[in-house]
Image (cartoon, helix red, strand yellow):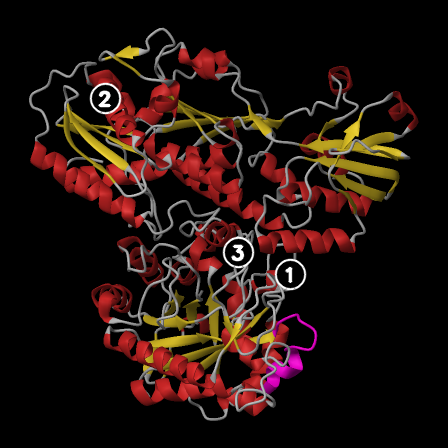
Amino acid sequence: MTDALLSEPLVLAGKRLRNRVAHASMTTHMGYQSQVSDRQIQYYENRAKGGAALIVTEPLLMAPHQTNPARIRVWNDDNLGGLKRWADAVEKHDCRLLGQIQDPGRGHHDAGRNYSALAPSALPDDLSWTMPHALTLTEIKNLIADFALSSARLQRCGFSGVELSGAHGHLFSQFMSPWSNRRTDEYGGDWENRTRFVRELVSSIRDLCGRQFIIGLKLPSNDGIPKSIGPEEAAVLADLFTRSKEVDYVCFAQGAHARSLETHVPDRNGPNVPYIGLIRKLKASCNEVAVMALGRITDPAEAEGILTRGDADLIGMGRTLLADPAWYNKAMQGRTNDIRYCISCNTCWDTIITYGEPLACVNNPRVAEKREVDWWPKPAKRKHRVVVVGAGIAGMEAAWVAAARGHSVTLLGTGSEVGGKARLRAQLPGGETITSIYDYQMVCAQRAGVDIQLGKRAELQDILSLNPDSVILATGGTMHRPEWVPEEIAREGWVTNLPSAMHDVVKLSSRQAGTAVVFDMDHTEGTYAAVELLAQRFERVVLMTPRALIAQDESLVTRQGILRRLSMARVEMLLLSEPVWSEQFEDGVLEYKNVYNGDLGRIENISFLSYATPRAANVDLVEPLKAYDLELYLVGDCRVARGLMGATRDGHKAGESVGRYINFRKETPMSSTTVRNIDVDTALKAIKAAREKASALKVNMSIAVCDAAGHLKAFVRMDGASLISLQIAQDKAHTAISGGIPTHKWHEYIKDDAPLIHGIVHTPRFIIFGGGYPIMENGQMIGGIGLSGGHYSQDMECAEAALKAIGLPE
């Protein structure tokens, strides 16, 4: 992009922003026990390297009553060193770092209720029904003082400013809203009083930090709650908060802790940039204070258009820069085809909010890694012939990464195009953005020289004829036939799984008579997208599940959208029910029963019946391939059925790893007789590094280091790890020593008739789930490290940290 407004500088509070791109606040869950972590710093530094001119952190602990261990503590001096390192890492890239001040107040979107919630009035949260404590005047004054003092502490540590989060139904917006604020003192009543808390806070921060400190304010534009804050009220707020010019920018967000929560992270089921029209109108009430646009801005052309029209002065993006930290740099270089686009699936929200895990992305398997920004793999030391079977998301990711490392890669796919089942999902409601995943993969595959062969199901001889050193199976999974479907009925194709059935439905152009029934044991968004399309094609649609709710495997915001859309489409939902097969089906009648009391019901005029169930891995090629001397990887649903993030992660890791263990297997003797053994001091150094990494990952592990003969040299059991985990860790170290490869790779190589290695019986559980890694030096085994307590990917990170600490290759 030449002469782009995106690249024009902007000055806020006397501080120059090099361009108009800002990283909006997102929780990372990468801190540990309220301390700044290296991984967290890396995440933010990567976005600064990628071109962002301003970054707003995740919410910070700015007052003593805030105790969430996933958030970084600022209200005392315990964390000064970490905060300084954080600011230095970002600011050295000419990027301004702002800390976010936020308190949820009565808002609560986790399970249960928050019994320590604060609010302006004792009124229940609209979502969780949490009943808060109503703040006293003294408590309000103390909060203002705490927040202001913490802001000054951030300034001393090198931060350029703060942003007050007054949207999303959090504490500040609860004070602003007549729905949640029923006070009768100076902090309630009219607009002046309801905004007093935030205005006094802004003034206090300005008094302490001066004019050379950026103060941003996030405001509600429409919280979606009747009698609360809609567009008209938002205009009043914008005017009140910007008259004094004490704030340097404002941005507007939607939703609250209510049924409108989904609107604060607009997803792929709606239009791009859905709120820009409202932002444009509200800008007129901002008294010429800079406005940051927010809300599903994913494409550089969209961002440029916003600035060109004068709708906003800054472009705020969170999920977009999560997906590709180099979004800005690539856009300025005219490399939009190289951008890994955000698909607006909100899996990131699910990861941090539902599961409390570190921030992750469907389309970016390298989040917060040192080599994340505009990443392209380093060449492998030795080139191998690799065959990838399956052209879906997992297979394509594995193929391009392996080829980019210099391997000769052939990809075999059954379909006529790449993408696999993702292509079907792209044809369903809300699926259009998914194409960007395999479009990007295709660009990379072509650049890396992958030989893509489509249109034929790969058999064993097809694979072997290519004389591969390594095979990556990405053959997907198939939905399990539920017990109520007779085998002969399934065989004849009367009732098929939902993906198979939808291949025909997407071709329909006219509305169909009769009733479509879907039996749901899947509970993921793809099933409900199919149901939405069925509602457009059939007169009546019934969704039946044996559970008490639908969409239970989706995040709250995704589930809200699903329930809203299916309700608006008048889809009937039968809960706690499952079909009963009978001869009446030949007459178009489906019987069903309540799963608890057995009461029967019937649905007439059936014209479509399908099921969505858990997927079993397609592993027919696994055992035949084990008979040959090949390195074998299973990725995506072929390993275990998950969503898109599992597919990209698996494929990416396989592409990075393929070929590494061939050398171990062929060059490392299956013996512990080596030049030397690891010593105690080295073992302790490895243990220390692995433990620190486990702490950063928030995983309680047992870690054991053995020498090449299997003798224990050092161990640790972290608080919270089970007693037996020490023995498991030692066993895993022994297994890795015996084979010279990580234990989570062992199931691909060992034979059923060889369970005894070094006199230790290793159960399949230990072998398959990994956690043991050989310690190699100059091609010789000198020891092994075993870890128990985390997912194998976490084990791997800890093992890599240990090896790096002792100066050995990862």
- Taking the view exactly as shown, the residue that stands out farthest to the right is 587
- Amino acid on which disc 2 is placed: His
Q: Quarter holding the N terminus?
A: bottom left
Of callouts 2 and 1, which one flags the residue occurring earlier in the amino acid sequence?
1
Mark 3: few/some/many CA within 10 Å (<14, 14-19, 20+)? few
Residue 278 lies, in percent from the top left, at 63, 75
Name the front one of labels 2 and 3. 3
Left or right side of 133 for 86: left
Query: Distance of mark 2 from mark 3, alpha carbons?
Result: 42 Å
Q: For residue 426, what is the image quadrant? A: top right
Q: Residue at x 46, y 40 (%)?
A: 648
Residue 224 inside the magenta-drawn segment: yes
Name the front one of labels 1 and 3. 3
Residue 299 lies, in percent from the top left, at 52, 60
Q: For residue 526, what is the image quadrant? A: top right
Mark 1: few/some/many CA within 10 Å (<14, 14-19, 20+)? few
- The circle drawn on residue 271 is 1
Q: Quarter holding the C terminus?
A: top left
- Amino acid on which disc 3 is placed: Asp
Q: Which residue is mark 3?
A: 110
Q: For residue 803, what is the image quadrant? A: top left
Helix, strand or loop under label 2: helix
Q: Which residue is mark 2?
A: 734
Query: Distance of mark 1 from mark 3, alpha carbons?
Result: 28 Å
Front position in the image: 500 or 121: 121
Q: Residue at x 89, y 30 (%)?
A: 589
Helix, strand or loop under label 1: loop
Whether residue 806 is visible, yes or no, is no
Q: Which residues are magenta?
A: 222-236
Of callouts 1 and 3, which one flags the residue occurring earlier in the amino acid sequence?
3
Query: Distance of mark 2 from mark 1, alpha carbons?
Result: 55 Å
